[in-house]
Protein backbone atom coordinates (compact mmCIF):
# COMPACT_ATOMS: atom_id res chain seq x y z
CA UNK A 1 0.00 0.00 0.00
CA UNK A 2 2.94 2.33 0.22
CA UNK A 3 6.34 3.01 -1.16
CA UNK A 4 5.35 3.28 -4.82
CA UNK A 5 2.68 6.00 -5.19
CA UNK A 6 -0.18 7.49 -3.18
CA UNK A 7 -3.31 5.50 -3.99
CA UNK A 8 -6.71 6.89 -4.93
CA UNK A 9 -9.48 5.62 -2.65
CA UNK A 10 -13.26 5.83 -3.00
CA UNK A 11 -13.58 8.49 -0.28
CA UNK A 12 -14.40 12.14 -0.80
CA UNK A 13 -12.73 14.46 1.71
CA UNK A 14 -14.45 15.61 4.88
CA UNK A 15 -12.19 16.94 7.65
CA UNK A 16 -14.63 15.82 10.38
CA UNK A 17 -15.69 12.45 8.99
CA UNK A 18 -13.81 10.31 11.51
CA UNK A 19 -15.21 12.30 14.42
CA UNK A 20 -18.80 11.55 13.36
CA UNK A 21 -18.81 8.10 11.78
CA UNK A 22 -17.77 4.54 12.59
CA UNK A 23 -14.06 3.82 12.54
CA UNK A 24 -14.43 0.34 11.04
CA UNK A 25 -13.82 0.68 7.29
CA UNK A 26 -15.85 3.88 6.82
CA UNK A 27 -16.61 5.22 3.34
CA UNK A 28 -17.21 8.92 2.79
CA UNK A 29 -19.63 9.28 -0.13
CA UNK A 30 -20.67 12.92 0.40
CA UNK A 31 -18.80 14.97 -2.20
CA UNK A 32 -19.77 18.41 -0.89
CA UNK A 33 -16.10 19.34 -0.42
CA UNK A 34 -15.29 18.54 -4.04
CA UNK A 35 -11.95 17.07 -2.87
CA UNK A 36 -10.73 13.46 -3.00
CA UNK A 37 -8.57 11.37 -0.69
CA UNK A 38 -5.38 9.49 -1.53
CA UNK A 39 -3.66 7.22 0.99
CA UNK A 40 -0.31 5.69 1.71
CA UNK A 41 2.87 7.22 0.49
CA UNK A 42 5.02 7.23 -2.57
CA UNK A 43 8.61 7.22 -3.64
CA UNK A 44 8.85 10.98 -2.99
CA UNK A 45 7.41 10.84 0.56
CA UNK A 46 9.77 11.94 3.32
CA UNK A 47 11.02 9.28 5.72
CA UNK A 48 8.64 8.81 8.64
CA UNK A 49 5.57 10.03 6.70
CA UNK A 50 4.97 6.95 4.59
CA UNK A 51 2.35 4.70 6.21
CA UNK A 52 -0.88 3.16 4.97
CA UNK A 53 -3.17 5.14 7.28
CA UNK A 54 -1.86 8.53 6.15
CA UNK A 55 -4.34 10.39 3.97
CA UNK A 56 -3.82 13.37 1.76
CA UNK A 57 -6.39 15.70 0.19
CA UNK A 58 -6.21 16.33 -3.55
CA UNK A 59 -8.27 17.83 -6.35
CA UNK A 60 -10.09 15.11 -8.34
CA UNK A 61 -8.25 16.21 -11.50
CA UNK A 62 -4.81 15.67 -9.94
CA UNK A 63 -2.31 14.02 -12.27
CA UNK A 64 1.30 13.51 -11.22
CA UNK A 65 3.94 10.83 -10.91
CA UNK A 66 3.35 10.23 -7.20
CA UNK A 67 -0.37 9.36 -7.37
CA UNK A 68 -1.88 6.19 -8.83
CA UNK A 69 -4.30 3.38 -8.11
CA UNK A 70 -4.40 -0.31 -7.33
CA UNK A 71 -6.68 -2.80 -9.04
CA UNK A 72 -8.27 -5.17 -6.54
CA UNK A 73 -11.13 -7.59 -6.47
CA UNK A 74 -13.19 -8.38 -3.39
CA UNK A 75 -13.43 -11.97 -2.31
Image (tube, rainbow, N blue to C red):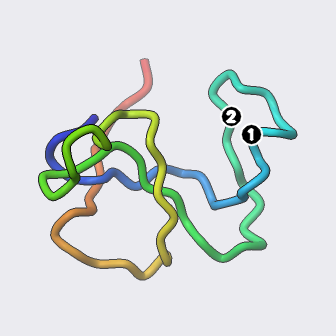
Point out the image quarter for the N terminus.
top left
Residue sitting nearer the eye, 45 or 17: 45
Residue assigned mark 2: 26
Q: How many marks?
A: 2
Left or right: residue 45 versus residue 25 is: left
Residue that carries the numbered disc 1 in the rendered image: 18
Q: Residue at x 83, y 35 (%)?
A: 21
* Along the viewing direction, whichever of 43 and 72 lies nearer the viewer: 43
Q: Is residue 54 left or right of residue 30?
A: left
Q: Secondary structure at mark 1?
A: helix
Question: Which image quadrant for residue 25?
Answer: top right
Q: Is residue 72 left or right of residue 12?
A: left
Residue located 22% across and 53% down the image = 45
Q: Earlier in the sequence, mark 1 or mark 2?
A: 1
SS under mark 2: loop
Q: Is residue 55 above or below residue 52?
A: below
Quadrant (top left, top right, bottom left, bottom right) of the C terminus: top left
Q: Is residue 62 above or below residue 44?
A: below
Q: Residue at the right extreme? A: 20
Q: Residue furthest bottom?
A: 61
Q: CA distance from mark 1 to mark 2?
A: 8 Å
Question: In this rendering, would 66 be left or right of 32?
Answer: left
Task: List x then y, in percent, for residue 59.
Answer: 49, 77
Vertical arrangement, residue 44 with respect to residue 48, above or below:
below
Q: Nearer the viewer, residue 2 or 27?
A: 2
Amino acid sequence: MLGNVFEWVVDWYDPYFYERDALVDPVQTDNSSGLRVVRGGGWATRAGYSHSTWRRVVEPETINNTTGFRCARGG
